[in-house]
Amino acid sequence: MAAKQIGDRPGGSSEIVRRLRAGTDMLTAAALSRLDAEMEWYGDLAAEDRSWLGLVAQSGIAAFIAWYEQPTTTSYNAEEIFRAAPPELTRSITLQQTLQLVRIVVEVVEEHAVQLAETSQQRDLREAVLLYSREVAFSAAEVYARAAEQRGAWDARLEALVMDSVLRGSTDASLRSRVAALGWSGKGATLVMVGSSAGPLDARRTADLRRAGRRVADDALVGIQGDRVLIVLGGEGDLRTAAEHLLPRFGPGPVVLGPQMRDIAEAGRSARAALAGLLAVPAWPGAPRPVQADELLPERMLNGDMLARRTLVQELYLPLTSAGGPLLQTLEEYLTQGRSLEAAARSLYVHPNTVRYRLRRIGQVVGWDPTDAREGFVLQVALAVGRLAEQSSNHTGV
């Protein structure tokens, strides 16, 4: 037997149509009562969303009655059912939940078929309901597919605006509202990582990269700058470890991690540091992958990055000067003597153990180990930059 199409059957009897119209409110109420009793998610909805669902159910029953009375292609338009509710409802109600609503409406109409039709017409009514419900299910899938496509395009534009705000360091209220609209939870810290793309990034690949970011961190945003990729990670976990899991997603070459910041409002500093590090990293051929932007402070400073210069002065030089003369003097002498404990001790007229102790204290004060070749180099540059900053300040004061 050939499958029945929408226009294959004759119109329903006027008596059944009259009974259906008279029972519309009853059928709607029965369907919503079943939803409330059987579907836990329905009770969790806001009152406004439950009201919209009532309109959708009522619209579906009314549309069925119109089609049942005159089943032609011109009278059938299941999409009209979903126009009774705003597009935003697709954010509150999933497609699966919508199909559960359709199923319950169908079951309710079937249950009341005895009241709505004579015995000889009940089978025809049930078949019509099943046929119509199938078409409604297809229409619901189309509505959700279009909503997802439109939402994806909108989210992509909104994400681009957010990334632009992050790079510009914009911290106004609009940034928080925009990231919230993108699903950013705002829990924990924020970190930006930058590297080259593995290939052209279209919408699908960008979405895949974003999903990969959200598998390793609570929050993730993706920005594209030519052949460079920026990923903003957020959350309460270990963001540096999360970033390392994403390394295979980048193309060949260095990947730079910006400093970890308190929240998305401060992500601009992390992004600018990471981008400056990406420009400066060729000056350090042995840089690890990924490399932290603060590990590139000397190279960034030499490349004209004023943020790196301020960091060297404020986070390394000034804490050392505030810690007392012996620490700064010991560091200067240790570096001058080619990182020799004995030579520094002789020059300072102290025991080598005293030099060793002071060097450990320096590591505790600034977080950089003078006895490590790379970190000692960073500290040596910090001393030079700090002295120049002091001299400039003195001249300005004069």
Image: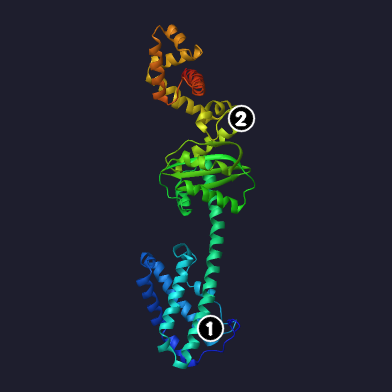
Q: Residue at x 56, y 46 (%)?
A: 223
Looking at numbered disc 1 in the image, what kind of residue is underneath it? Answer: Trp
Q: Which residue is mark 2?
A: 282
Question: Tag 1 or tag 2, which sits nearer the N-term?
Answer: 1
Q: Nearer the viewer, residue 53 or 200?
A: 200
348 or 150: nearer the viewer = 348
Camera sees residue 118: no
Instruction: State the image coordinates of residue 377 (x, y, percent, origin top left).
Output: 52, 21
Q: What amino acid type is highlighted by mark number 2?
A: Pro
Rendered location of residue 163, percent (x, y):
53, 46
> Which residue lies at the image location 50% right of the left edge and 88% below the top edge?
124
Is the image coloured rainbow, by chain, by secondary structure, or in one colour? rainbow
242 vs 40: above or below: above
- Between the C-alphas of marks 2 and 1, the distance is 70 Å
User: Which sits in the foreground, 99 or 190?
Assistant: 99
Sort mark 2 into few (<14), some (14-19) or many (20+) by Cα contacts within 10 Å. Answer: few
Q: Which residue bears the numbered disc 1? A: 67
Label 1: state its secondary structure. helix
Q: Check whether the beta carbons of the residues at disc 2 and disc 1 lie within 8 A of each other.
A: no
Residue sticking out furthest to the right:
200
